[in-house]
Image (cartoon, rainbow, N blue to C red):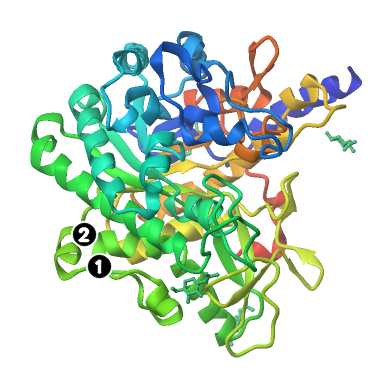
Amino acid sequence: MARLFFLLLLFPLLYSSVTGLNRSDFPPSFLFGASTSSYQVEGAYLDDSKGLSNWDVFSHVPGNIDDGSNGDVAADHYHRYKDDIEMMHSIGLSSYRFSLSWSRILPKGRFGGVNQAGVKFYNSLINGLLEKGIQPFVTINHYDIPEELQERYNSWLNPEIQEDFTYFVELCFKMFGDRVKHWVTFNEPNLIVKLAYSIGAFPPNRCSEPYGKCDSGNSSTEPYIAAHNMILAHAKTVNIYRKNYKSKQGGFVGISLHLRWYEPLRNITEDHLAVSRALSFDAPWILDPLFFGDYPHQMRQILGPNLPKFTEGEKKLLKNQIDFIGVNHYQTFYVKDCIYSLCDMDAYPSEALVSISTERNGIPIGKPTPVANTYVVPSSMEKLVMYLKQRYKSIPLYITENGYAQIANISTTAEEIINDIERSTYIRDYLTYLSFAIRKGADVRGYFVWSLMDNFEWISGYTVKYGLCHVNFKSLKRTPKLSAKWYSKFIKGYEQIEMASEELPKHMVS
Ligand SMILES: *[C@@H]1O[C@H](CO)[C@@H](O)[C@H](O)[C@H]1NC(C)=O
Ligand SMILES: *[C@@H]1O[C@H](CO)[C@@H](O)[C@H](O)[C@H]1NC(C)=O
Ligand SMILES: *[C@@H]1O[C@H](CO)[C@@H](O)[C@H](O)[C@H]1NC(C)=O
Ligand SMILES: *[C@@H]1O[C@H](CO)[C@@H](O)[C@H](O)[C@H]1NC(C)=O
């Protein structure tokens, strides 16, 4: 109780200030939202003829999920979406980013029929959002795929999946495109292929040593093959949309990437080049093909034949096949060159020939968070956005994920989770630096907190909590956290919000 009282006293301090961040630092049309994904929140994993996804199968194998849990029920969003829309409305969100469960709509991919109950669910969700003035921001594929496609032909390793994907997206445009104006083809293709095919921790658990221990796979080639198929599937999707739907529906198709920021460990040319290499293995890997028609030369130089090639016809198809970039940003690292310098690369296996760390001379890169290797460095938000603006010119950006995790253990109370002052501060400070980028001319059009509510956080199960709203996974009751209240006040523009410059690592402020 004493703790709660203390927090209540602190709370007003978060707002009051002389010259702080406020809603008018962002354009009036700017979307303030929150994100989720289908497998992480929906539950109802067998309801109404849904087909099995790769995650349904994977999470049921003992030992795969840290806390032995699965997404069978998750936050039960499938049954509680109406309450969740109410919750979003009361916070004041102008957009909700969610993903479609492919196997709920097409239980067997293109090898079976359309599940009308799945279509009905998403229609109800979309209509419910629009009734409250909340824009649906739809991710077509966020990690979960029909298990059928895995079993039939090895999913992303097979170019055939491009056919399945475009079959699915065409259906989505037909069914939902009259109301959905923002489509994200893939969530974090650059991360998921690493998790699935390099370290092999996510389905289909393929990898080779020294990156991981798996029954089969090849960490040097398969991540790049899987990403190659995703890039082509994305380009074909945009092509279909522009040809057949854009003029009637007037929407936009983008892609969301997992984007870290990097700082040179030492202020020497070699480490500045290492930063540029590390960066090119994140965004340009996926985006250079979609803007310029081919992979960045730094990747080609290092990976050689392990990086697949686009045909001349594909290069033509690829160019300018994107309407916006979705930025998912959580982490900042120091990088050290490993071409000209002696270094060991074992912190993270890095194909970019850099060594990655989170400390310089024993001083961490930012304020630590409960998640390993994840520090709070709000200025990275501005730097990342300015880097993308410089490389990809006038393309609109949406911050499709940014957020702070809490880790719960057996003795963590709901009260502790709900009083998330760290998350409130985190969001405020990242938004502050985002507003600096906007002031410098970056065309950023929205910001989505990951996540609307606590959910099934992949292999961490229910122990890692990113929500603005707490979910009691026994009663499934939702409770807005302190951060939801802060975000709400900010969006509604009630008060000015102070910037906590004392919380920023001094050496990071430039
Ligand atoms: C909000 O911020 C803007 C831009 O920094 C400033 O011009 C304006 O006065 C602020 N509004 C309030 C109510 O403080
Ligand atoms: C992975 O594939 C490459 C290219 O075909 C090959 O050189 C390498 O030996 C393979 N590695 C493993 C572990 O199979
Ligand atoms: C890095 O070194 C250059 C000159 O080599 C200097 O101008 C610059 O201020 C240094 N930057 C930092 C952050 O120390
Ligand atoms: C559980 O988490 C709390 C922070 O919420 C931490 O102080 C405590 O040490 C943790 N206990 C165990 C057993 O890990």
- State the image coordinates of residue 169 (x, y, percent, origin top left): 25, 35
The residue that mark 1 highlights is: 310
Which residue occupies the foreground of this view, 183 or 488? Answer: 183
Do the CB atoms of the residues marked 2 and 1 lie less than 8 Å apart?
yes
Residue flagged by tag 2: what amino acid is it?
Leu
Residue placed at 9% from the left, 37% from the top? 244
Which residue occupies the foreground of this view, 493 or 314? Answer: 314
Disc 1 crowd rating (10 Å Cα; few below 14, some 14-19, many 20+) is: some
Q: Is residue 381 above or below residue 247?
A: below
Residue placed at 20% from the left, 34% from the top? 170
In what element is the residue under mark 2?
A: helix
Which residue occupies the foreground of this view, 349 or 431? Answer: 349
- State the image coordinates of residue 435 (x, y, percent, origin top left): 47, 47
Which residue occupies the foreground of this view, 331 or 20? Answer: 331
Q: Is residue 56 above or below residue 157?
A: above
Q: Earlier in the sequence, mark 2 or mark 1?
A: 1
Instruction: Report the mark closest to the observer, 2 or 1.
Output: 1
The residue that mark 2 highlights is: 318
Residue placed at 68% from the left, 17% from the top? 473
- State the image coordinates of residue 160 (x, y, percent, origin top left): 28, 49
In the picture, the quarter occupied by the C terminus is bottom right
